[in-house]
Amino acid sequence: MYAVSDEFLTAVQENTRTYYWSGTITTTAGKVYDFDYKNIVKGSGYVTSKCCSSSEIELGTVYSAEMGITLYSDVDRYTLEDAVVELYYHLLLSDGTYETVPMGIYEVAEANRTLNCLEITAYDYMLRFDKDFSSTDSTGTAWGFISLCCTACDVECAHTQEEIEAMANGNITLSIYSENDIETYRDVLYYVAQILGGFFIINRTGQLELRKYGTDAVMEIESKHRFSSSFSDFITRYTAISSTNLRTETAEYYSLDPDDGLTMNLGSNPLLQFGLETTRQEICMNILDDLQAVNYVPFDSDTIGNPALDLGDVLRFSGGSADEEQISCITSFNCAIGGKMTLKCVGKNPRLSQAKSKNDKNISGLLSQVDAAEIAIHTYTNASAYTIGSSKTEVVSIEFAASQDTSAEFIAQILIDITADAVTKTATAEGTITIPDTSSDSDSSEDIETSGTEVEVSLPVTWTEDGEALVYVVYELNDDEITVFYPVETWHSGKHILTLY
């Protein structure tokens, strides 16, 4: 839920409330158009968003929120291509002041004009990630991939590196399997969100934010706050996940004990194809731990509305046909400007699920194997740069497996930008100088040089110059350090290439 005051939460649940909507439209040329409630055609405005499909809970989703509105406006529709629309909700509190809740930032996708009105359909910044992902292979942590996507698509991230790395699987090095279906940066975010056990949304300030399913209810919705509601007679919960391993041609199955709930199918996530079996198990069990929070009663309800509610918010319903002991989660909502707010939680019935077959672990034939006589070459590029100092920093990690005896060569080219510490040097300059003798003529004021005197001198000299940086390389094989070979390079400041084999 968007952070609002207690006074807001009290006022928004009263039998009557006083509120209004407003917004701004900013064109790419910098022209700003303000609009308020009187400019909005009654019943035309809405904000809709979801984090799941229409039938079941999902992980890794990257859905875009949609905003539609019709305004009494004479703005030229041709100037609104890629214009930014910001929407706000204002609620009157008991002390006579208004509290403002931002309702999102959207980019205009379509603008149509009637005689007196302007019809606008806009989407949030998630569509910016529909940009071709150029790298077929890459390596990095979850933060590295998120940072790469945000930088390439000009979207700010709502999290810090420390926050992402503190999450389960947040500090594990991930590699993109070369045979993948990744086409856009949005696809990359989908698979990263799966690894982190959550889903991505664009928050109200236009930032990319990762959210996870929780168990703590943010508010209770009583029967008097609902126009209509429908609740399922089962609880959606998960006790297992399956993930297709493309290299071993099997669907790996990880479960809790007892395993009596639904199975979440992660599909063939290209970030889950490399690594030892224990590493894959650790990643998948961490995802399953996050998924255990899903213990929700699916519902569909038309409410009086609370624009501060967000996707992923856990709710408790009371009164009517609701079970006050159970919780639900908002997986989609439609907030009508000046009207009702429809909330929904989707989910499957564990008793009717057919996704629990343990035979999935033995699925084979997903890939045609590479002929033994052929050479397979795989390349990758780091998703983000490393900063190397006086302590060891892992810059290349290669995990390799083969179905039969073979040989492999690993080559790495590392681009390094050296900044060496400047050094101050001192020395003594020694040499011989000649001091000329002079004589004066009595009839002339002119001095006449004759012979000179040689003198041995020694002078201290100090100067500053670029220093040298020593780059030490350590090889490890199966976590054991190779002690017979330690490459060392000595470089001045500047750009260099370190080639490793």
Image (cartoon, helix red, strand yellow):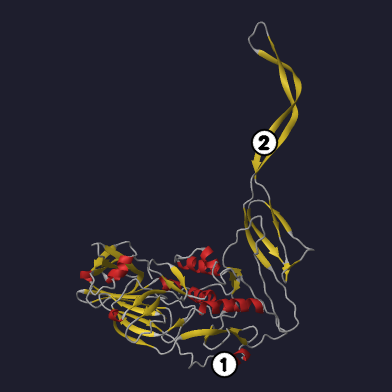
Alpha carbon distance from label 2 to label 1? 79 Å
Residues 261 and 34: in front is: 261
Residue under numbered circle 1: 357
Q: Is 317 positioned to the left or the right of 142 in the image?
A: left
Residue 411, image x, y percentages: 69, 69
Question: Residue at the right extreme?
Answer: 484
Q: Secondary structure at mark 1?
A: loop
Residue 128, image x, y percentages: 43, 71
Precedes in sequence: disc 2 or disc 1? 1
Q: Residue at x 64, y 83 (%)?
A: 247
Number of other residues with Cα within 10 Å of mark 2, as a class: few under 14, some 14 to 19, many 20 or more: few
Residue 397, image x, y percentages: 66, 69
Residue 472, image x, y percentages: 71, 58
Q: Quadrant of residue 383?
A: bottom right
- Amino acid type, residue under disc 1 in the picture: Ser
Q: Residue at x 27, y 67 (%)?
A: 91
Q: Quadrant of residue 498?
A: bottom right
